[in-house]
Image (cartoon, rainbow, N blue to C red):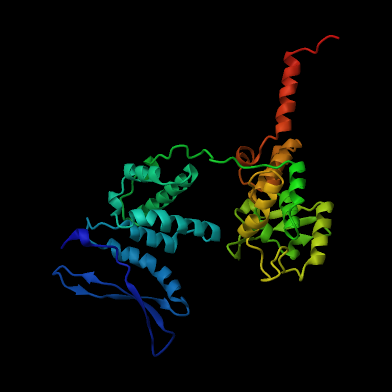
Amino acid sequence: MDLKRQRFQFGWLDLKQRKNGPAVWVLRYRERLPDGSKREPSRIIGTIKDYPTESDARTASMSLLVSINREKPQGVPIVFGAVIKLFLAEEVPERASTRSRYESWIENHIKPRWAEFPINQIKPVAVEDWLKKLKLAPKSKSHLKGLMRLLFNAAMRWEFLPYQLNPMSLVRVRDSSKRIREPRALSAVEFRRLLEYIPEPFHTMCIVAMCLGLRVSELLGLKWGAIDWEGSRIAIRQSWVYGRPGDVKTRSSQRWMPLDSSLADVLRQHRLQALSAGAEDWVFSNPETGKPFWPGRVQEHWLVPAAEKAGLGRIGWHTFRHSHSSLLHALGVDLKVQQELLRHADIRTTMNIYTHVVPTALREANSKVVRLVIPARVA
């Protein structure tokens, strides 16, 4: 038997009808016997009530397939493409944005290069060389390395590899912590100048994003029922990502936010213009669809052109979150309060990534030092 020709066995599914009870999903696969002949064993996955679709049954069969493939003779290589398939079926996070990003990296970069390689032949130096040649930002290369590490962790957990130091931990990505473009933070004056070029309802969207420091997914996930008008607060409970509702990014992100009376007035005015403003209606919905706007389209059609007209350079939705953090810092707000308002799980994220010192603060701080070093001239 040529061991090099062996591959991971994925099998196929049949829906088998029964005289009594609901139909069952049956996993069938090929097996080579010691005498060289083949047979096709089958195993029941569950009923159609348990798994209404073939996709559900396929996901449920993955753990069984792992067990079946472990029974192969020692030395039979598992190709990396098999690990990828299992990972996509069982390990990818449920959050839509994370899932979409992982699937994109795998389909566009990892799978074309490594799918046909036996997993035990993928070496750190080769992966490092591959990453160097990719025309991507260092941060993106670092994300790819991290995803490769997750794939190898999964392979060891499934016993496709011996338990060992993850080979991807030896891969180096130069300048992975450096940004190609520093995030933009707007001053209050710059923000007001920007608003002059943005029409409704995007005008109000920008005000809410700037005043509360929300992620755009949280901004679009707002429903009118989330606003407690009497208690002057607003609940951040869900997000809107890639055309569907979902959870907010982290557990720390899910909380009540204070609603200033001035911002409440802006939202009340916006509500008067809304076609529907019931508790379950979206605060910022496209009147043509009744669903939240696509943030990328709003950014390209309104934010970017407005910023160019205002002489601010290119900005995006996350600019408002960075700006909110920087304004809090410039106003001398306690660091712990800044963290709570931005809803960061780690205070280091607040300080090291989101807070930008405004130029006037730099000048004032420098002037204080200068006045200590150089005494005032005597008239």
Q: Position of residue 76 (x, y in %)?
A: 23, 58
Q: Residue at x 59, y 65 (%)?
A: 243
Q: Residue at x 67, y 60 (%)?
A: 220
Residue 95 appearing in the image: no
Residue 286 versus residue 86: which sits nearer the camera? 286
Report the side of 89 relative to 334 (left or right).
left
Q: Is residue 281 above or below residue 154?
A: below
Q: Position of residue 158 (x, y in %)?
A: 35, 57
Q: Residue 166 lies in what quarter of the image?
A: top left
Report the quarter where the C terminus lies: top right
Q: Is residue 312 above or below residue 256?
A: above
Report the side of 73 relative to 338 (left or right).
left
Q: Residue 322 lies in what quarter of the image?
A: top right
Q: Position of residue 46 (x, y in %)?
A: 41, 76
Extreme-front residue of the structure: 309
Q: Residue at x 78, y 55 (%)?
A: 233
Q: Position of residue 121 (x, y in %)?
A: 27, 49
Extreme-left residue of the structure: 35
Q: Residue 97 lies in what quarter of the image?
A: bottom right
Residue 297 versus residue 109: which sits nearer the camera? 297
Extreme-top residue of the structure: 378
Residue 350 appearing in the image: yes
Report the quarter where the N terminus lies: bottom left
Q: Is residue 28 above or below residue 184?
A: below
Residue 197 versus residue 351: which sits nearer the camera? 197
